[in-house]
Amino acid sequence: AADVERALELGADGVGLLRTEFLFLDRSSLPSEDEQARTLEEIARGLAGRPLIVRTLDAGADKPLPGMATEREDNPFLGRRGIRLSLAEPDLFDAQLRAILRVAARHPLKVMFPMVSGLGEVEAAFAALQRARADTGIDEPLEVGIMVEVPAAALLAERLARLIDFFSIGTNDLAQYTMAAERGNERVAPLLAGPHPAVLRLVRETAAAAEAHDRWVGVCGELAGDPAAALLLVGLGVRELSVAPALIPAVKAALREVTIDDASAAARRALAASSAEEARQAAAALL
Ligand code: PEP
Ligand code: MG
């Protein structure tokens, strides 16, 4: 809640990614449904009617929950994380969804699920949301989205789009899994630097599927906070960007320099580029 004021001062129109992990980490017990609802309510109040996109818990593996026993995994980034963990722990997931629904009854919340890799997960998450609606008796409309962070989700976007209201592309993980380069490993960091054409092609795939089904697409990975890359994302059809508060002014300033047509032309050049650096040049030339 303390960050909301600063984000608004810097020009935010809402919150595009609330990482709810912060409620679960660094403590030995899980937060209750009431505590979760209170915290979400406080953040939503600070936003005074602006949208708040709540991401369900993205813990597991490299972000283990101290309040829950989890088995060791050899490759935690490829393990039971995000929606996989939530679906394996229905009590935890249902409590979080009930808390979200309670606040969504009074504020413009949206919810999204992390690390989706296929339709079955989305259907199971919707079933959980239905249970939470039945338990709380809350039936106010709630926009439901999924994060596109796994290449499979981008490649299946045309099918997934029918089930959901929006996509939010998590370029941090999408780049990691596309380039097979771990986010935190400095030795492979150059593989993840900048708007790589392989990642941009998955963004294009996602945006085209969304457009065909009249859904909207946002980007909430760090790529959105890089002004030249943001321009390429918009050129590919992305219409919502979620960035760290300090980066909002620079991204807005860059976008105001160009028309959508200019951005689309730059994006087409970037898709044909042979490296992230060359792709970035396509946009930087406009700024
Ligand atoms: C992402 O993967 O791009 C993302 C926004 O999620 P996180 O950084 O929390 O994994
Ligand atoms: Mg992620």
Image (cartoon, rainbow, N blue to C red):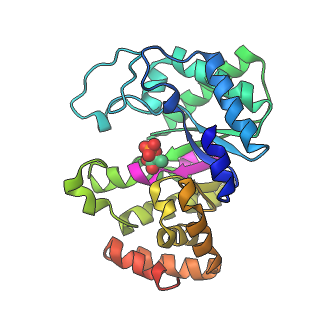
- The answer to whether 107 appears left or right of 124 in the picture is right
187 shown above or below 102: below
Decide which of 158, 147 is in the foreground and name it. Answer: 147
74 shown above or below 48: above
The quarter of the image holding the N terminus is top right
The residue segment tinted magenta is: 159-173
183 shown above or below 238: above
Decide which of 272, 75 is in the foreground and name it. Answer: 75
Percent across and percent down for residue 287 are 52, 82
Q: Residue at x 66, y 28 (%)?
A: 100
For residue 149, say whether it is visible: no
Percent across and percent down for residue 81 are 39, 32
Report the residue that reaches farthest toward the bottom.
285
Q: Is residue 78 magenta?
A: no
Q: How many marks?
A: 0
Percent across and percent down for residue 133 are 71, 22
Percent across and percent down for residue 211 are 64, 61
Q: Residue at x 54, y 58 (%)?
A: 246
- The answer to whether 266 appears left or right of 276 in the picture is right
Decide which of 155, 148 is in the foreground and name it. Answer: 148
